[in-house]
Image: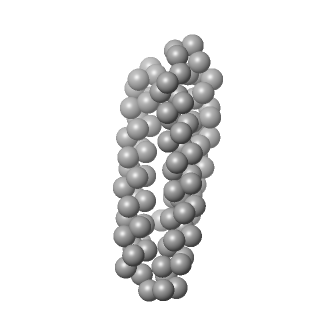
Amino acid sequence: MKNAYVAKMEAELNGWSARLKELKAKAEKATAQGRIEYQKKLEASKLKHDAAARKLAELKSAGEDKWEALKSGVESAWNELRSEFDKNPKN
């Protein structure tokens, strides 16, 4: 169960990593004002992404006896990251 959950979360994290790359590319192509807006979105999204990655790393290293307890922290970080990306939909 833990391995399947971790694999699913890693796949989602990889998808969000790709979205961060897209956001960064758009920021580089934007005009000066647009670049500032994209940079703000990028920074906020990157912070949430990094927090989710840290939580996933904690979960991966947890023993079978502790991973259920850590799962709620991972899900909370995931919800925050998802919310951040929902504020910054693809254009």
Residue most extreme to the top: 65
Residue at point 40%, 52% (across, down): 17
Q: Position of residue 49 (x, y in %)?
A: 51, 50
Q: Nearer the viewer, residue 53 or 2?
A: 53
Colour scheme in use: one colour
Q: Position of residue 48 (x, y in %)?
A: 56, 52
State which quarter of the image contains the N terminus.
Answer: top left
State which quarter of the image contains the C terminus.
Answer: bottom left
Above or below: residue 50 compared with residue 90: above
Q: Is residue 78 visible?
A: no
Quarter assignment of residue 11: top left
Above or below: residue 22 compared with residue 18: below
Above or below: residue 40 compared with residue 56: below
Q: Nearer the viewer, residue 58 or 90?
A: 58
Q: In the visual, does 21 lie left or right of 43?
A: left
Q: Is residue 19 visible?
A: yes
Quarter assignment of residue 51: top right
Residue at point 57%, 13% (across, down): 65
Residue at point 50%, 35% (across, down): 56
Q: Position of residue 21 (x, y in %)?
A: 38, 61
- How many numbered callouts? 0
Q: Position of residue 35 (x, y in %)?
A: 48, 79
Residue at point 47%, 27% (across, down): 60
